[in-house]
Image (cartoon, grey):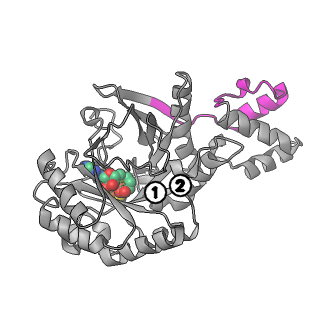
């Protein structure tokens, strides 16, 4: 069993079965998530027989690092992991040294919507599924189809991998975004279990506001998430301001129309008093005109929100082109005139196919 799949109560139950006191489970928990141990031998505060039992019973790493690639500017690293069943998943680390990552004056947001955003960020983008069932046409993960859900431990393990790497350089992960492969709300339980594990104050103690979960817009799950009143940031992939064009790009719009989606987002804002972020991949001639921006502005009026627009990243299965910088700025300004804050994000890691929507779990790009 992958040790990261256990929460503290489950670990305590296991230790109890071995006639060990509850505090031993806590010691293991702290070893895993505070000291970032990844093998039983490192738990020198435990007896040798217990360590041997752990080695026999638990798996400390169930994936192999198949490859990793650094972007030419050195700010982005993409790692390809192979799971025991040979499925491949990717996780991307993005380093921001100052206020880079955004074009324009609005520096209010880049997924980290917390007030005290550290200037130097180490943002980790992780996967929740191998592949994705949602089939958005512009997305490489969607183009590959659905393979399987990741367990909570497989999600947590991606964070621990990078946390260890950064620790060796005296650095740490500052933000975790659920924006890698897969649809987090299509794997709701495991996604939230991973948040709970990483958030635990006796363990990794990663603050709720430093997580962002991005969803294609699964309405019942957005409502459930709102009811759970988590402090985790929510991002919703919108990409179109009318149902017809959204449906052309995102099959999910057949099930949940924009009006219903925005109602769920409004419910989220009411329940949590937190702002929702809408993601918008700017595609030349498709969803980047001032008219579209005006229409979007009208639809979002009154909703506490923010739009994160990013010029489309290229994928092999989709013909659309990215909006150029000038048009992107015009889109942002039109939206802001309608009272909706908008940030244009700079694309990252495109040369290693590590950008949004480019993760295809392929050893070669
Ligand atoms: N499944 C979730 C999270 C993973 S995708 C979701 O769809 O929200 C992360 C973000 O990248 C989403 O906003 C998605 O719409 C966006 N995206 C997908 N393909 C893209 C592309 N080719 N260029 C830019 N953004 C893209
Ligand atoms: Fe899945 Fe998100 Fe890609 Fe759509 S954009 S196919 S939901 S990963």
Q: Which mark is residue 59?
A: none
Asked if disc 2 and disc 1 are in contact, CB closer than 8 Å, the reply is yes
Depth order, front residue of 213/354 = 213
Image position of 195 with respect to 77: above or below? below
Depth order, front residue of 153/18 = 153
Look at the numbered disc 1 and give the secondary structure of its residue.
Answer: helix
Q: Is residue 220 left or right of residue 361?
A: right
For disc 1, the marked residue is: 184
Q: Residue at x 28, y 59 (%)?
A: 136
Q: Is residue 103 left or right of residue 268?
A: left
Ligand 1 near label 1 (Cβ, under 8 Å)? Answer: yes
**Residue sticking out furthest to the top:** 169
Q: Which residues are magenta?
A: 36-65
Q: Residue at x 62, y 48 (%)?
A: 199
Whole-number angstrom distance, CA of label 2 to CA of label 1: 6 Å
Q: Residues within 10 Å of mark 1 (few under 14, many from 20)?
A: many
Return the x and y of residue 121 as percentages of the image width and height. 44, 36
Return the x and y of residue 339 as percentages of the image width and height. 28, 66
Q: Earlier in the sequence, mark 2 or mark 1?
A: 1
Q: Quarter containing ligand 2?
A: bottom left
Residue 97 seen from this side: yes
* Quadrant in the rendering for residue 80: top left
Q: Which mark is residue 191?
A: 2
Return the x and y of residue 154 as percentages of the image width and height. 54, 44
Q: Is residue 90 left or right of residue 104?
A: right
Depth order, front residue of 334/7 = 334
Q: Residue at x 42, y 30 (%)?
A: 66
Q: Residues within 10 Å of mark 2 (few under 14, many from 20)?
A: many
Residue 129: in magenta span: no
Q: Residue at x 21, y 56 (%)?
A: 332
Q: Is residue 47 left or right of residue 364?
A: right
Residue 149 seen from this side: no
């Amino acid at each position: 069993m992958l040790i990261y799949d256990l929460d503290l109560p489950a670990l305590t139950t296991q230790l109890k079965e071995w006639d060990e006191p509850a505090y031993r489970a806590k010691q293991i928990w702290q070893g895993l998530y505070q000291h970032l141990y990844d093998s039983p031998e490192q738990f020198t505060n435990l007896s040798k027989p217990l360590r041997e039992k752990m080695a026999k019973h638990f798996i400390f790493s169930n994936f192999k690092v198949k490859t990793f690639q650094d972007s030419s500017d050195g700010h982005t690293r993409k790692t390809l992991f192979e799971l025991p069943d040979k499925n491949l998943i990717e996780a991307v680390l993005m380093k921001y040294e100052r206020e880079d990552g955004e074009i324009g004056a609005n520096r209010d947001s880049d997924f980290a919507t917390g007030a005290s955003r550290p200037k130097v960020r180490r943002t980790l983008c992780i996967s929740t599924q191998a592949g994705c069932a949602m089939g958005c046409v512009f997305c490489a993960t969607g183009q590959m189809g659905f393979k399987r859900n990741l367990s909570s431990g497989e999600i947590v393990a991606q964070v621990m991998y990078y946390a260890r790497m950064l620790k060796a350089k005296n650095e740490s992960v500052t933000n975790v975004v659920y924006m890698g492969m897969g649809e987090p709300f299509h794997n709701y339980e495991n996604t939230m279990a991973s948040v709970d594990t990483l958030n635990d104050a006796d363990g990794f103690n990663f603050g709720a506001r430093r997580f962002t979960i991005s969803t294609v817009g699964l309405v019942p799950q957005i409502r459930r998430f709102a009811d759970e009143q988590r402090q985790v940031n929510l991002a919703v992939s919108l990409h179109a301001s009318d149902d017809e064009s959204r449906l052309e790009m995102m099959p999910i719009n057949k099930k949940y129309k924009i009006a219903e989606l925005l109602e769920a987002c409004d419910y989220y804002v009411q329940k949590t008093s937190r702002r929702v972020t809408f993601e918008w991949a700017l595609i030349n001639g498709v969803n980047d005109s001032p008219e579209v921006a005006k229409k979007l502005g009208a639809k979002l009026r009154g909703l506490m929100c923010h739009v994160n627009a990013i010029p489309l990243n290229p994928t092999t299965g989709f013909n659309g082109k990215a909006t150029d910088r000038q048009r992107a700025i015009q889109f942002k300004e039109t939206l802001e005139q309608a009272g909706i804050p908008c940030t244009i994000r700079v694309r990252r890691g495109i040369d290693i196919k590590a950008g949004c929507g480019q993760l295809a779990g392929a050893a070669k790009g």
